[in-house]
Amino acid sequence: MTRKRIKNFSLPASLFVLGVLLFSNFTNAQAAPSEAPRNVIFMVGDGMGFGQVKAYRMYADDPATDIIEPLPVDGLMVGTVATDSIRINCKGLEAKCTRDPYGVTDSASSATAYATGADTVVGRLSISTSGEIMPTILEQAARRGKSTGLVATSQITHATPAAFGAHVISRNQQNDIADQYFDRKLDGKPVIDVMLGGGLQYMQREDRDLVSEFRSAGYEVALDSSELLAMKGDKLLGLFSPKGMPRAWDRDDKVPDLADMSRVALDSLGRNPKGFFLLVEGSQIDWAAHNGSVAGVVSEMEDFIAAIRVVLDFARKNDDTLVIITADHETGGMSLGRDGTYAWNPRPLHGMKATPRAMTLRYLAGEESLADIVAENVAFKLTVSEIELLNAAAREEDPADEAIAAVFNQRTHTGWTSDGHTGVDVPLYATGPGSARFHGVMQNEDLGRVMWEVFLPE
């Protein structure tokens, strides 16, 4: 049997040689800036490293063809991002921070680097090491008369979206973040025009009903998929779960996917003749990887890739749009191949009726055995040893998560080095006006700085 090959995006040999010669000149003298894009769409696959990308590419492959079908981002790769946190050892606002060039970041400090072009302490959101507010690219875009939006499958008050629209010492201050989304105003109006994702419990609380306040301020509010798809205005608030949204494979018809939220956001923001800035985050790639759940990763990668298709379709129709796609960090140290096995097998992931997260929640809520729940939701027959492993798990969240993950990791030959973040570089994709400025290995704050320079030149 002939080995399948991924479709080749490389240049012919003669063009490659010419490209090398031209690139040597390019790196020694910065190219003249191209016309500034009217719109920027910044997409973050939270926790998405090269392992997560390839796992989905292999899962999505059509076995009936002779090639491994490429993902829509494969032809857009321009480099990688180093996500190192370099100021992680600060013990208070008055303390001097120790520089550690090899620190591993969290979403808050990495998203802050993208949003502001400057690094900060792990856990802080667009607040400097000395406690000062750092303006974000979203806020500056609003000052230029552009529209702004945040779309995420986490709660919209979570670290990555919040870094673009709020300023707090701790990412855990989610009520404060929600308050700032309404209270931080420009010309008497909230700075962020479109907010779609989870997080209803932070916006509608005993001490404050921000949903009503946004509605009174002229925002359309949607609480389910049908209401989202009916939105027509330029001020939108959509909240589709109390905290993070269900995993993509677990959503019912009432919960929209990331592609639908992105499409509605683009329809709204795209009406502004001055342009817009939009952040779109596939948030739960990271959450699944924290659990060592290959099935969860593939579920969320599928959701993210579908949103990328929507965004790229918009960019093709609006050639003044810069699209940048990357990650805040890699999570889990995901490897395709483990225990000396020179293979990775996506087949056990096909035909699943629910993600391991949903299986665990069902196990915690009832009296069924974990093996029976898993057997009902997969397309393969559990072995005796797998049944014993699953039924030995205590009726608690972590043991159940770990038992289910072990079944899929063994069957797919997926390995994990950590249940946290890692320091490896993450992929960088870009297309549209200004995309030539993004190339090679970029530090995350440098990417943020260049994005600001390209989009909002002085």
Image: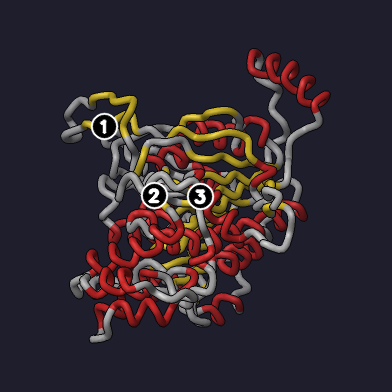
Comparing labels 1 and 2, the label whose residue is closer to the camera: 2
The image quarter containing residue 90 is top left
Residue 272: x percent and y percent? 66, 56
Judging by the rendered image, the residue that carries numbered circle 2 is 415
Residue 405: quadrant of the picture:
bottom left
**Horizontal relation, residue 147 to residue 372: left or right:** right
Tags 3 and 2 touching, CB below 8 Å: no
Q: Earlier in the sequence, mark 3 or mark 2?
A: 3
SS for dot 2: strand
Q: Nearer the viewer, residue 254 or 213?
A: 254
Q: Amino acid at mark 3?
A: Ala
The residue that appears at 33% across and 82% down in the rendered structure is: 372
User: Residue beneath label 3, please?
Assistant: 343
Q: Is residue 394 left or right of residue 188?
A: left
Q: Which residue is mark 1?
A: 130
Amino acid under disc 1: Ser
How would you rate the neighbour count of disc 2 (Cα within 10 Å): few for under 14, some for 14-19, many for 20 or more? Answer: many
